[in-house]
Amino acid sequence: MKKKLLVFIFILAAAFTYAQKVNTEFYSITINGNKISPTENFKQQKELLRQESLKEPMKKSEYFLLQFAEIPTAKQQQKLEEQGITLVGYLPNTTYYAEIDSKFYFESRPAANIRAIIPIESEYKIDQEIATGAIPDYAYESADIIKVVVTYFKGANYNEMLGDLTQKNIRLPKYKSFFNEMYLSVPKNKIKELANLEWVQNIELVGPPMESENLPGTTSHKANVLNSTIPGLGYGLTGKGVKIGIWDGNLQQHKDHTGRLTIREYESTSSHGNHVSGTIGGAGLLDPRAKGMAPMAEMFGWNFNTQSNGLPVYEERVWAAQNDGIELTSNSYGINVTACPNLNRYAVNDRGDDNAMYTFPYLLNVYSNGNNQSVCVGGFNTSSKSSKNAIHVANLDNFDIISSSSSFGPSIDGRLIPQISAVGSNVWSLGYYNSYEFMSGTSMSTPGVTGTLALLYERYKKIYNNQKPLASMLKALVSNTARDIGNPGPDYKHGFGQLNGVRAIEALEKNGSIPER
């Protein structure tokens, strides 16, 4: 009996220890490589802050990490705002960046559910590349000065920020209020001082230079059926009324554009951009074999790298959405992955894209997944793509087999990329000076997806009285109607599978009911 009791006590103790470990891990968060395991300290920390506020009555608010026992409801968040807490950004594991007004410390009955208040240490704000001194050449302005992007807390006062920078002799070349960002040139020895400023949320290096992702359709995507006007077979879709932004090399007017191309930026010569535009919306006038997916879509050409206008791509997107009304974007470029393990992570350009899509919920970005499969043995983790809301596209050959170059996921933080696969090998499309040429790569599979999405976009607007579909809905639609290829279910090579425009249209018309075929 004693033996059984001892075994039971041991099992109980082990279970308790395991539960404690799981509980600790659940509430642990990592910021810029710093792992934080907060204890449940809300009452003690609140009282400590109350005492400090009595000593500094002029200090009205501060920024903290605020952790909850569970995600607060909309009603609880409203109550928190009334009491002096504004949640300004979410982190994993029920944790938020929060601005806390000092009046909250004197609330006798504060909103329930808060687990911990965590001071934001300066090291939490500094990206690991900067903290470890592993700064690539492109981020240096001179021997001691590096180019960084500083994210500041929403609601921070511009004049106060400018005053702090002036006092530290740090110049401000770009200020991006829409994205709560500053582009700064900072001496390396002043990074810690910069991080100590209350309004600074995060400091990271500027994004690396991008490269076009091509290598030294229509029937595969079922766009031919969607284009067809044959009664009982096709849908007569052409992309008419859909506006697409193309970020690539210079676009040059071609007869197959039939007057539907507006060039917004022209900085560097490359027929790569023309090739992409033809796959999306070429009319097939001079050569019917090069007809694109959406031959009546309206297109707008931008560059992705030189940026002589002073705007990063994600800010150009905001301008294009506001002024041109773009609804889809095609992006066949990225960072060239040259080393394994691949350390490219979610950074300023990914976050900017996601913020633009959050601001314009109908705007869907489509990206090539990269051509660096050979960099790592097995090919996994060879994509530099990390944005959360975009569609990332893998490259299939004409036999619907993944190409030997197409990059595999996952992202560095374990998310599924790519999401969809499409033909991008030996694609015949537009070149410069009214010519045509073959190109291959995820650069070529991406515009095939974008053009097909334009047809879905057009159909949705016809069904729903010219309303624009949510980008998240379109992403879910093409993912869940894809033809499963490769390993059963979603995988890091093919995503959800091969794009199937007809199946997506059928699901759209049946209110989300996915056909069997």
Image (spheres, grey):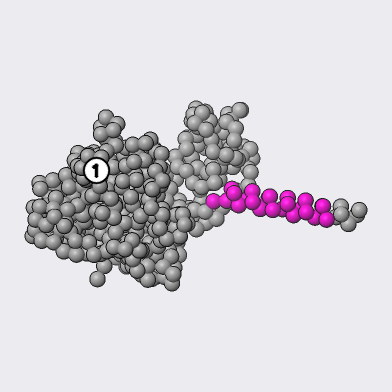
Q: Position of residue 41 (x, y in %)?
A: 63, 43
Q: Which residue is mark 1?
A: 234
Q: Position of residue 283 (x, y in %)?
A: 14, 50
Residue 305 left/right relative to 44: left
Q: Which stretch is magenta?
A: 7-29
Label 1: how many Cα within 10 Å (few below 14, some 14–19, many 20+): some
Residue 180 left/right relative to 246: right
Please determine whether, in this image, residue 29 is positioned above or below residue 513: below
Q: Residue at x 64, y 40 (%)?
A: 44
Q: Position of residue 35 (x, y in %)?
A: 55, 55
Based on the picture, tell me whether residue 10 belongs to the magenta stretch.
Answer: yes
Q: Position of residue 255 (x, y in %)?
A: 8, 52
Please determine whether, in this image, residue 504 is positioned above or below residue 338: above
Instruction: Name the residue nearer the viewer: 218 or 1.
Output: 218
Q: Quadrant of residue 137?
A: bottom left
Q: Quadrant of residue 66?
A: top right
Identity of the residue furthest to the right in this view:
1
Q: Residue at x 22, y 39 (%)?
A: 231
Q: Main secondary structure of the magenta part?
A: helix
User: Looking at the picture, which amino acid does disc 1 mark?
Assistant: Gly
